[in-house]
Image (cartoon, helix red, strand yellow):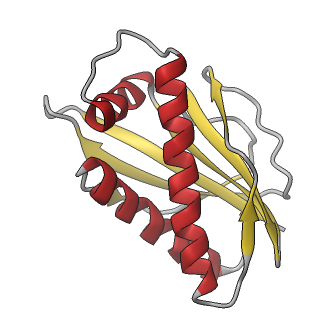
Amino acid sequence: MHVEYINPFIIATTTVFKTMLNIDLTMNKPILRNTRISTGDVTGIMGLAGDTKGTISISFTKAGALFVYKTLMGEDHAGIDPDVVDAIGELTNITSGQARKEFEKTNINLKAAIPMVIVGKDVELHMISALPIVSLPFHFQTNNSHEEIVHVDFSFE
């Protein structure tokens, strides 16, 4: 894994969460994962191809996904429904787009597939690229001061 692949995802994630959701993220230490298991309850995932190929996924706990939906749309939802799934897919798409803009600054051109969202805990994800997967764990505070974690995972060939 090339180190220059990490910063575009850090910049993209923090920028998107700040501008779209007014959420300040704090990143914990990046980790390498050798498993293909989702890290949350709701995971947006999309493939990237171009000068290289890879995959990005963004995983939320159920509470985190519902908080993001409420922050984005101004509505409460009791559970993960098609509206929440759509919002997580769109957030994945926007974050991927911002990361691709950052990659362009280093002359790495990537195109993205249509995002899909997987609902379920410990779902096995077969990313198109090899292990290890770089995991960027971010945390943020909800309105009731509960701490939530969002994992941005990616892997490239």
Q: Is residue 43 above or below residue 8?
A: above
Q: Is residue 8 above or below residue 134?
A: below
* Horizontal and vertical percent position of residue 28: 39, 58
Q: Quadrant of residue 82?
A: top right
Closer to the camera in the image, 86 or 44: 86
Q: Is residue 83 left or right of residue 100?
A: left
* Horizontal and vertical percent position of residue 15: 36, 65
Is residue 48 at all visible to an observer of this figure?
yes
Is residue 28 at all visible to an observer of this figure?
no
Tell me the quadrant of the picture where the N terminus can be found.
Answer: bottom right
Q: Is residue 90 left or right of residue 147?
A: right
Q: Quadrant of residue 110?
A: bottom right
Closer to the camera in the image, 8 or 137: 8
Which residue: 51% across, 57% down? Answer: 95
Which residue: 14% across, 34% down? Answer: 145
* Horizontal and vertical percent position of residue 151: 50, 47
Residue furthest to the top in view is 78
* Horizontal and vertical percent position of residue 43: 59, 35
